[in-house]
Amino acid sequence: MREVLQAGMRFAIESALSVTVSQVRKDQLKAGRDRFVTLSTRLHYV
């Protein structure tokens, strides 16, 4: 029974971590895209 609990906890932690990592990646991608758009508009108006 304890092994099942430990496996469940590990699975929960790993899935939470993967969700967090994918969310961070998404935020970084969005930030990078926003930065690129800002740079290109600045260059366009110069």
Image (cartoon, rainbow, N blue to C red):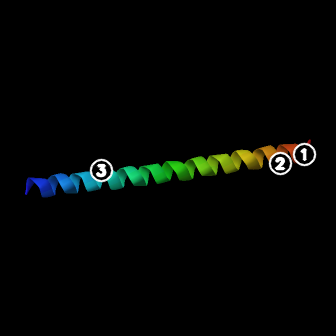
Q: Amino acid at mark 2?
A: Thr
**Label 3 neighbour load within 10 Å: few <14, some 14-19, many 20+:** few
Q: Which mark is residue 11?
A: none
Q: Is residue 40 left or right of residue 18?
A: right
Q: Quadrant of the C terminus?
A: top right
Q: Earlier in the sequence, mark 1 or mark 3?
A: 3
Position in image of residue 28 (x %, y %) = 58, 47
Q: Do the numbered discs 1 and 3 sit on residues whose CB atoms are within 8 Å?
A: no
User: Is residue 5 rendered to the left or right of residue 40?
Assistant: left
Assess disc 1: are there few (<14), some (14-19) or many (≥20) residues with their C-alpha within 10 Å of its C-alpha.
few
Q: Would residue 28 appear left or right of 20 to someone viewing this image?
A: right
For image coordinates 66% across by 46% down, the residue present is: 32
Tell me the tag on residue 41. Answer: 2
Label 1 and label 2: CA atoms lie apart by 6 Å
Q: Which residue is mark 1?
A: 45
* Nearest to the observer: residue 34 or residue 7: 7
Q: Is residue 45 left or right of residue 20?
A: right
Q: Residue at x 53, y 50 (%)?
A: 25
So how many labels did they put on this image?
Answer: 3
- In the image, residue 21 lies at what x, y percent? 45, 49
Dot 1 and dot 2 residues touching (CB under 8 Å): yes
Q: Disc 3 marks which residue?
A: 13
- Tell me what residue is drawn at x 82 percent, y 47 percent: 40
Furthest-left residue in this view: 1
Q: Quadrant of residue 7?
A: bottom left
Residue 2 lies, in percent from the top left, at: 9, 53
Of badges 1 and 3, the one in the foreground is 3
Disc 3 marks a residue whose amino acid type is Ile
- Category of crowding for the residue at label 2, using alpha-carbon neighbours closer than 10 angstroms: few (below 14), some (14–19), many (at least 20): few
